[in-house]
Structure formats: structure tokens, C-alpha cells
Image: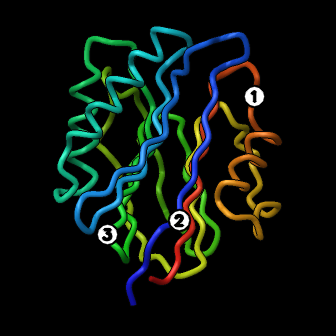
Amino acid sequence: MALRLTIAHRSRPKSGEQENGDIALVRQEGAHTLLAVVDALGHGPVAARVASDAARCLEQQSLSGGVGPVVDALHAALRNGRGAAVMLGLFDGHTLHCAGVGNVELRSRGTKVPVIPTPGILGQSMRSLRTASAPLQHGDRLVFFSDGLSFRLDLEPTRSLPPGEACALLMERYARTTDDATVLVADVETV
């Protein structure tokens, strides 16, 4: 049974800033779907440039080699800059393969995704990349979010909401005005 993702995301800069150092990116390549939340260190124009560099890199990477090479390419692309945290998921129609560096989170409802972010900062220093994989099922929900949202984030109030409305509710309840904030919600559905 083939699965697909229904995805929405929201992002906004820190209160008082015009430019956002967070991005959410979704990209399809063949049977693979890339889900990414990147949080450049700091906020404002410098962080926004780092986030833009990260997006350019993620748009150009092949998705057929897995999450490790994508994270390695992003780490190289952000060298000599401020750096960033990231959570990446690569969905192949059945299984989510994921990796994170720094303080961007992935939570799930339904299937448990055992990802533990690797300590470090992309573009500066990080330990050996930790990756995780989990076969997904119809009805699962994935939520990627930057540290601009409280880690006390509770998925339960979004249970019956479609992804776009879930993003809006999570931003309203958990986003901090003192940082850029980004959330991405992906629901797993049968094709």
C-alpha cells in the first residue's frame, strides 16, 4: 500500500524583525519527499542569508543517496558562516529516514520516530551524524519545529485539524516572540 504526505508549514520572524532566519522546505524528487526545517543561528538579515543559503543547497541535492549526504552537503555549504540547526526527513513512500543537528525537533503522533538530534552546529562543528528510520502508517502525523516554539509543544489539540490549521494553532499557542519560529506538519495518508 503506497502512502503520501499532506504537508503544510508556517514560519515567521522574531517580533520586531523583517527577515526570518528560519525556513521550512518541502521538495519532491522521484519517489522521495524531503521535509526540512532549518534554524540559522540568531535572527535578522544575517540569519536570513544563512537560511537562504541552506535552502539553495537543499534544492540542489540529490535525494536518492539518503539523509546523510544531504546533511553533509548542507554542513559544507554553511561553512564560514554563522551556522544553523536542522531537522531533515526523507520519505520514500513507506519509510521516513531522518537526521537532525542542533535544536530543531521532530515529534510524531502514531508511529514513533526514534530520531535524536546530533549535537553541534551545521557549518561549524558536529559529531558523527545520528540517523533514524521508521516505517510510517496511514494516520501518522509528523511535526518538525524550530526552537522558536516551546519544546513543551503538545500535539493532542491538533488531532482533528488538517495540517494547515494544525500549524496555525501550534504557532499561536507555542511560538515565542523572542525568536524566529517555524513549524511543519505532515500527515501520512493512503494514496
- For the point 23% across and 57% down, the residue is 66
The tag on residue 6 is 2
> Given the image, on which type of amino acid does mark 3 rest?
Asp
The tag on residue 92 is 3
Which sits earlier in the primary sequence, circle 2 or circle 1? 2
Residue 75 location, x and y as percent?
A: 27, 30
Residue nearest the observer in this picture, 119 or 31 = 31
Which sits earlier in the primary sequence, circle 1 or circle 3? 3
Residue 129 location, x and y as percent?
A: 31, 45
The tag on residue 176 is 1
Which sits earlier in the primary sequence, circle 2 or circle 3? 2
Residue 1 position by quadrant: bottom left
Numbered-mark total? 3
> Given the image, on which type of amino acid does mark 2 rest?
Thr
Tag 1–tag 3 contact (CB < 8 Å)? no
Judge the density around disc 2: few (<14), some (14-19), many (≥20) Cα neighbours within 10 Å.
few
Give the SS element for disc 3.
loop
Left or right of 59 in this view: 12: right
